[in-house]
Image: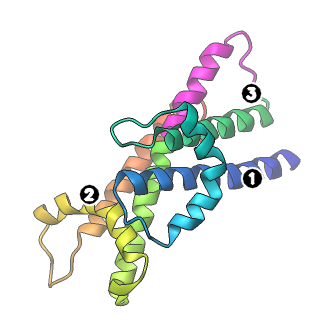
Amino acid sequence: MLIRALDFLLNTFLGTFAGALVLRFLLQLLRAPARHPLAPFLSALTDWVVRPARRVIPGLWGLDLATLVAAWATEALLLAVSLWLWGADPGPAVGAAAVAVLLAALVALLRLAVYLVMGATILQAVLSWTGGDYHPMTPVLSALTRPFLEPLRRRIPPIGNVDISPAFLVIACQLLVMLLAGLQANLGAGG
């Protein structure tokens, strides 16, 4: 029971922190408006790791690699400690186990990013039904979903003036999450 509680707390705190780092990276990558409501929150939550990491890890092609590497390290730590809590013993294959954890952490980051896009899509659809075009989060949600929805909107016509492309994006995201979960389980560090 104690191990389950510790694992829950670990996943809650480190998982949320990794999610904040991934969201920060995605918002920068997708050029979300700089003055969105999440900016001060994400900065306050993650700057203590991102700022020092930027001194060591330079950006590349406009990408904030320090944030991405910090998210990856957080996920790897989460997986490694979780495996240790549950008594996983790599034995003499410590190197192979470390590589598996690093790969599983990378897959976990991809899953997290897909979950964030899926959540933004659902929230954006709900806001559009309730007249939320003027909601402060609308530009942020639009920045997160536009690169994925635009190709679908070009191919899927509205039905009765209702844009159903968000439903197709959510379905695609869910299928991708299932695929990534299977891949992560095959790496031996499922989550």
Q: Of the residues under marks 1 and 2, which one precedes in the sequence?
A: 1
Give the CA distance from mark 3 to mark 2. Answer: 40 Å
Which residue is at 63% across, 60% downward?
44
Could you tell me residue 119's position as x and y percent?
Answer: 45, 65
Q: Which residue is mark 1?
A: 8
**Residue 46 visible in the picture:** yes
Q: Does 128 appear above or below 109?
A: below
Looking at this view, name the residue that lies furthest to the right: 2
Give the CA distance from mark 1 to mark 2. Answer: 34 Å
| Three-letter residue code for mark 1 | Phe
Taking depth in this image into account, of 181 and 139 the one nearest to the observer is: 139
**Which mark lies nearer to you, 3 or 2?**
2
| Three-letter residue code for mark 3 | Ala
The chief SS type of the magenta part is helix
Residue 117 in magenta stretch: no
Taking depth in this image into account, of 125 and 23 the one nearest to the observer is: 23
Which residue is at 39% across, 68% downward?
140
Q: Which residue is mark 2?
A: 147
Which residue is at 37% across, 76% downward?
138
Q: Which residue is mark 3?
A: 88
Tag on residue 175?
A: none
Could you tell me residue 5's position as x and y percent?
Answer: 82, 52
